[in-house]
Amino acid sequence: MANQREIILSGIRPTGRLHFGNYFGAIQHFVRLQEQGHGCYYFIADYHALTTISERTDFYRQTIDMLRTYVACGLDPNKSVIYRQSDLPCTAELTLLLGMITNIGFLERGTTYKDKLNKLEETAGTEGNPLSYGLMGYPVLMAADILIVRADKVPVGDDQRQHVEMAMDIAQRFNYRFGQTLKVPAAVSREALRLPGLDGSAKMGKSDHNTLDLLDDPASVLRKLKGVQTSTEPLPLETDSDDPDIVIPLMPASVGILYRLLSLLAPNEVYLDFLGKYRRCERFYGTLKTTLAQYVSAFNAPIIERFNDPANNEESVRTFLRENAERVTPVALETVEACRAAMGIGHSLYRA
Ligand code: TYM
């Protein structure tokens, strides 16, 4: 049991299959915090998935499959409240209320928004979704997710750090204007991870097609790892340290991802053995990839097995979604009602 029981909240967009970035950046912490006995709320952010939509996408199916993967990774709907964002529609109401005190200039400084804007300018606005009101409001919706359950901590990867800071900021602004109403969550831990992509780019991400997925079978794992670009010469490691955080950034980026995965999945002596080979500039990338592929597939095997367990089916997911939406709704409505009252429109009359 945890020393002090905290409220934990986090979510993942249903953009496809879960990858190793999602797992090591977020899900492993979800499971750890759940097992420590904290009050955990984990959801699938299906409203957020709509912020970049340009044609109908079967987010319902993707949500069900991601929830089956949550369960396969060890998340337990009896220990954590696991739900779908759109089953808690009062989140949209809180988003609206928080939007009233959020400046456009503040949202324009959001890095996700700026990246999308830059990409759109590069393609002269001819592709994808034009920057929508919904996309710009992404951090406000995310703030509502966090603030609605009065979260103390938000376990996320390093890429979501700014969004959590924006939620802290919005809560502080609300409390300053209308009196102490919202719980301000803690900032994201300094150790939060950002796993690079298999192409050596800074971040593994679904839309960049550079992911290693939790449901990849051994053949796909081997194919993906063999495809990692390793023709570059080893760069000299100007350090005696073996610490992955120190040595890996000194390697060519695409080689670094192999070592990062090895450090996460293999016993330390295996990682150190390959680090030695790197230092001695031996010819070893072939064996590094096949060894790593074995560790990745061994990691994936029980997840794939639990994903395919007949008991982990659509019906069981729908049942716990219904039950858990009922558990989170009263907590969420209390926050929305408190914000309505604080802003002066008063409590909802039909919900009373
Ligand atoms: P999303 O769906 O992009 O990612 C889900 C989680 O996985 C982490 N992650 C990574 N961590 C390390 N390295 C990577 N390469 C990597 N790729 C993804 C993300 O940091 C995240 O923790 N906006 C959120 C979803 C969201 C949310 C929230 C999260 C909506 N509302 C409220 C927390 C609280 C998102 O798009 O995550």
Image (cartoon, helix red, strand yellow):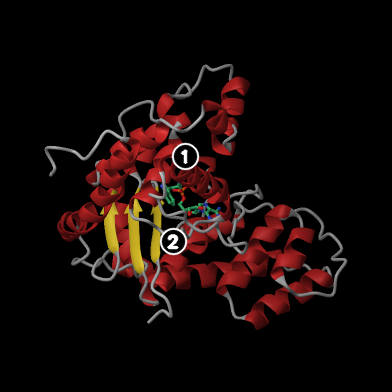
The amino acid marked with disc number 1 is Pro
Q: Which mark is residue 152?
A: 2
* Vertical placement of residue 76 versus 49, above or below: below
- Point out the tag, 1 or 2, that comes first from the N-terminus: 1
Do labels 1 and 2 touch, CB within 8 Å?
Answer: no
Say few, some or many: other residues with alpha carbon within 10 Å of mark 1 (under 14 / 14 to 19 / 20 or more): many
Residue at the (45%, 39%) spot, across then down: 177
* Image-based side of 73 in relation to 206, left or right: left
Residue ID at (61%, 27%): 118
Q: Please, what is the three-letter code of the amino acid marked with disc 2?
A: Asp
User: Closer to the camera, 54 or 110?
Assistant: 110
* Residue 93 drawn above or below residue 146: above
Which one is in front, 162 or 100?
100
User: Do we see residue 15 in this rendering?
Assistant: no
Which numbered dot is residue 279?
A: none
Q: Is residue 231 left or right of residue 159?
A: right
Please indicate whether residue 216 sits to the left or right of residue 327 in the image. right
Disc 2 secondary structure class? loop
Rounded to the nearest whole Å, what is the CA distance between mark 1 and mark 2? 18 Å
What residue sits right under mark 1 in the picture?
139
